[in-house]
Image (spheres, rainbow, N blue to C red):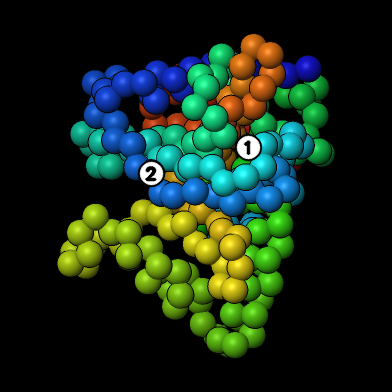
């Protein structure tokens, strides 16, 4: 049993303009995937989230962000993609965790997603997540009373600012390698900010996994989909 997205994300990947909005592709480097157990979450708020049920290919794979240059809200990441293959996806299958059951979804346009409360989404491997959580715990022990975003990650984001000399340009993404390891965690701004966002496996007709995407509901959004997440 599978639930398909109402959106074909190839429309975003294949075109420089979508819905009369310019789309820019930003390559943020590769993600190390040693186990194939992928976590999608807000890495600052729930970094211990459970991985997705399906196991992806293992190796190192590019992460791409598709930025919509909206006329009213400025530059916004519309979709994030972890690209396992250059092969084109034929369908987009809702990514689930073990505890999520499709029979609990009451409507065709409802979905399971992950909550965002710090304005960030991210991909990482389950092994990286465990290592990252130890890093965060150790950082807090060594820096009592400090905030890990303000006092550590903000400087990492600033390195990727479009204009580092602009004090209002804080940077929109990082590809953070955990010190002392070859494991990394990606973090990027989540569309219009906090909310609940779904992930979809890009698959061929033969169910080969070619990508994993996060939809931030900026482009090609079916009417009403942004408020049809399933309560967990």
Residue 109 against residue 131 in the figure, above or below: above
Q: Which circle marks residue 215 in the picture?
A: none
Q: Is residue 117 visible?
A: no
In this view of the protein, which residue sits in the foreground, 38 or 70? 38
Please report the residue visible at 49 percent of the width from the left and 62 percent of the height from the top. Answer: 176
Question: Under tag 1, what secondary structure?
Answer: loop
Q: Residue 3 appears in which quarter of the rendering?
A: top right
Q: Looking at the image, which residue sits at the far left? A: 165
Residue 119 against residue 213 in the figure, above or below: below
Q: Which residue is mark 2?
A: 27
Residue 161 against residue 148 in the figure, above or below: above
In this view of the protein, which residue sits in the foreground, 42 or 33? 33
Q: Is residue 37 visible?
A: yes
Coordinates of residue 72 in the picture (x, y in percent)? 23, 36
Question: Under tag 2, what secondary structure?
Answer: strand
Q: Which residue is mark 1?
A: 113
Relative to residue 24, is residue 86 drawn left or right?
Answer: right
Of circles 2 and 1, the one toward us is: 2
Q: Residue 19 appears in which quarter of the rendering?
A: top left
Coordinates of residue 146 in the picture (x, y in percent)? 51, 82
């Amino acid at each position: 049993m599978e639930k398909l997205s109402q959106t074909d994300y190839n429309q975003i990947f294949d075109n420089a303009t979508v819905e009369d909005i310019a789309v820019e592709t930003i390559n943020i480097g590769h993600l190390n995937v040693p186990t194939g157990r992928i976590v999608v979450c807000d890495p600052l708020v729930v970094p211990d989230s459970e991985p997705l049920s399906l196991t992806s290919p293992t190796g190192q794979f590019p992460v791409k962000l598709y930025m919509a240059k909206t006329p009213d809200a400025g530059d916004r990441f519309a979709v994030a993609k972890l690209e396992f293959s250059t092969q084109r996806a034929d369908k987009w299958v809702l990514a689930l965790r073990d505890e999520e059951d499709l029979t609990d979804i009451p409507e065709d346009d409802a979905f399971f997603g992950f909550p965002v409360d710090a304005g960030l989404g991210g991909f990482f491997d389950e092994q990286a997540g465990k290592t990252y959580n130890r890093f965060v715990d150790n950082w807090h022990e060594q820096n009592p009373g400090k905030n890990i975003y303000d006092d550590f990650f903000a400087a990492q984001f600033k390195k990727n600012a479009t204009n580092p000399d602009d004090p209002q340009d804080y940077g929109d993404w990082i590809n953070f390698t955990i010190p002392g390891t070859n494991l990394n965690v990606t973090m990027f701004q989540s569309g219009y900010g906090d909310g609940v966002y779904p992930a979809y496996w890009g698959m061929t007709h033969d169910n080969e996994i070619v990508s994993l995407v996060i939809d931030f509901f900026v482009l090609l959004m079916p009417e009403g989909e942004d408020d049809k997440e399933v309560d967990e």
